Structures are given as C-alpha cells and as structure tokens.
Amino acid sequence: MSAPDDTGTIGDAVAGFTSKLRGGDLGSLPVVVGLVIIAVLFQALNPRFLAPGNLVNLTLQAAPLGVIALGTVVVLLAAQIDLSVGSVSGLASAIVGVCAMRLQWPMLVGIVAAIAAGALIGAFYGFLLSRFGVPSFLITLAGLLGFLGLQLALLGPTGSINIPFSNPLVQFANTWFLPPWAAYLIVGIAAIGMLVEGLARRRRRARADLPLSHISITIVKAASLLVLLSIAVWYLSLDRGTAVMPVLFVLLVVIMSYLLRRTRWGRSIYAVGGNVEAARRAGIRVTRTLVTAFVICSAFAALGGVLSAARLGSATTLTGTADTNLNAIAAAIIGGTSLFGGRGNAWSAVLGVLVISAISSGLTLLNLDASVRYMITGAVLLLAVIADSLSRRSRTSHGRA
C-alpha cells in the first residue's frame, strides 16, 4: 500500500473550511466573530475596555467561571445537564472556609475536601440517573436547592467566612503572576506542542493511507499560535502580566481536551451523547460513562467555587448563587457545545467564558446595572442555541442528501 500524496495546500485548506461552513459546520467561527464585535463595540464606548489592566482583570474574573463551565461541557457532551453547578461551587467555597478558618485545618486539606465533596455529589447524581432513570434535569434541580441549603447551614448566621489576604490561596487568585520569561516559555511550549500534535496526526493518517494536508499548514498553525500568544503576553505585561490562575484554567482545558479526543473514555462520552442506544449496542458502558461525566462536572464546579472564594477573599452566601449557575451553562453553549450532545470540545469553555466575561466587564465600565447584563447575556445565549439548532438541521439535511 503506497503512502498518500502530500498534496493538500493552504488553498485546499481554505476551500475545505468554506465547504464546512456551507454544510452547516460553523465550528467556533460565530464565537470568534462575536468576540471581535464585542471588543470593538465596548472599546468604542469606553477606551479603557482593551487597556492592559482591564484585560488582566478580565482573565482573573473569567478563570473561576471557566473552570465550572469546563465541567458543564463534559456533561452536555454526554447529552445531559447539571443545573446545580452553581450551588455545588458555593458549597465547596463554604467547605474551604469552614475547614481552613473555623477548624484551622491546612488550606490544602480544605481544598481537597471541597473537591472530593464535589466528586461525591457527581457520583450521587450518576447513581440516581442510572439506578432510577430520573432525568438529570430533575436530579440536579433538586441538588441546586439542597446544596444551596447546605451551604447556608455551613456558613451559619453570619453568612460569610473571611479568608485573610495573606493566605496563599487568596494570593494565588489575586497577586500571583508569571515572570515574563516563564510566560514566553509556556507560549513556546504551546506552539511546539501544536506542531508535534500536527505532525503526529499526519503520521497517523499516513499509516491509515488517508489524504494528507501539506506540512506547511501545520507549521503555519503553530507559528500563528506562537505569534498571537506572544503578543498577548507582551500586552498583558504592560500592566501586571500573565496571572497564574488563568494559566491553571487553560492547563485544565488542555488536559480535558486530550482526554476527550485521545482516550477511550472521551470517545465514549461523544458516542453516548450522539446516540446512547447505539453506544450501548457497540459495547460502551453507558452507566459508567455517565457517572464519570457527572463526577468530573461536579468536581470542576467545586474547584471553581474554591477559586471564587480565593478571588473574593471570603466564602459568602453569594458565592455560587445569583447568575453563576446559568452563566456556566451559557458559557458552554455559547462556546459551541451542543445542547443535543455529542458535539463540542473543551475549548468551548474558554470561548464561552470570554464572551460572558467580556460582556460583564464592558457593561461594568459603562456603569450599567445587572439588568442590562442579564438581558444581553440571555440574547447571546438565545442566538447560540438558534445557531446550534440550525447547524444541526443543516448537517442532518446534508447527510440525507
């Protein structure tokens, strides 16, 4: 069997991308275009929007919500939903506050306890779903109320537990920034990683005797990533620099992206989300797959709650409440994860949370109240759902054709 010809040029790649768009596979294009429009609009209304200081604050604000949204992506990919991620994050923040401040346990023990509690909650959801067949909508709706009550009980009559600014967890979320050399080193590693991944993909396709894109496409992608991230690091360094907490969020996204794309478990998630009965007939352990999806979702929600408490320097009754729950779900959907399951990726959390955080930051700079933010976020979410439905309908019609 001869190796496939290396004939796919950059022009062919552009033509293939155009063909995907015509077929309804929009990918992340609407989100990227939306981000550009949001940036241009808010910058025109307030020149401070794209200032380095505001962008640093935006990345710090986005990280806790992004971690919660990352777990939500996993559940949505499995064609399920978790309405309690906000309450679980609030409960986790209360657990950290109680363990570290009231019980005087080491902070690391409190963090582990909070994340473990989140994982147990996810396992409980998975058990109820698989054992009794109760829809995840109803299970997690009950969890939303129940764990909110538990959060209030832990915090007690004061309703808050302050964490000193000198605490390493609070400093991690507010004052820890990478030195420039370390930030550029991470950028270089990311670009090299993309290049290595692209070359490995070409080798796999060559062994399978599949058509190959030209190697220049892989090199251009890696070089583009290197340039864009280097510019971002340089621009943020004009203020405080690259914060550690957003880097942790991106690292979690990279890990989850690999697990979803390159492992048997990840393929099972997509298969169950695409067609649960077909997945079962193919020998996939559907129950185990759903349980792990909920465990990961709740564990990430708990970690997001810990980061939120660290960012605020306190665990309060407001942590995880208000719009946290809906914003996490909205971020996953806006980022490109399908409500119907089986389509999306871990990077959806990054794109979606950037949209949510950019809208919030821009409206704050314009001194507009929360009512406007809710309405605009709701409109963006509605547009994302409509785009998802139209894209799904278009792919179905093309498949029949």
Image (cartoon, rainbow, N blue to C red):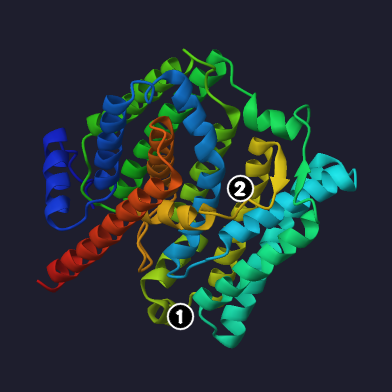
Which label was assigned to residue 304? 2
- Reply above or below: 172 against 318: above
- Residue at 41%, 49% (x, y): give it: 371
- Please rate how many residues cluster around mark 1, counting C-alpha atoms within 10 Å: few if below 14, some from 14 to 19, many from 20: some
Q: Are marks 1 and 2 in contact (CB under 8 Å)?
A: no
Q: Which residue is mark 1?
A: 280
**Looking at the picture, which amino acid does disc 1 mark?**
Arg
- Residue at 33%, 49% (x, y): give it: 376
- Please rate how many residues cluster around mark 2, counting C-alpha atoms within 10 Å: few if below 14, some from 14 to 19, many from 20: many
Which label was assigned to residue 313? none
Q: Looking at the image, can residue 250 be seen?
A: no
Where is the C terminus found, in terms of image quarters? bottom left
Element marked by disc 1: helix
44 relative to 127 in the view: left or right: left
Task: Where is residue 246? Give x, y as percent.
Answer: 54, 34
- Distance from disc 1 to disc 2, alpha carbons, whole Å, reads 32 Å
Element marked by disc 2: helix
Seen as rendered, the residue at the extreme bottom is 132
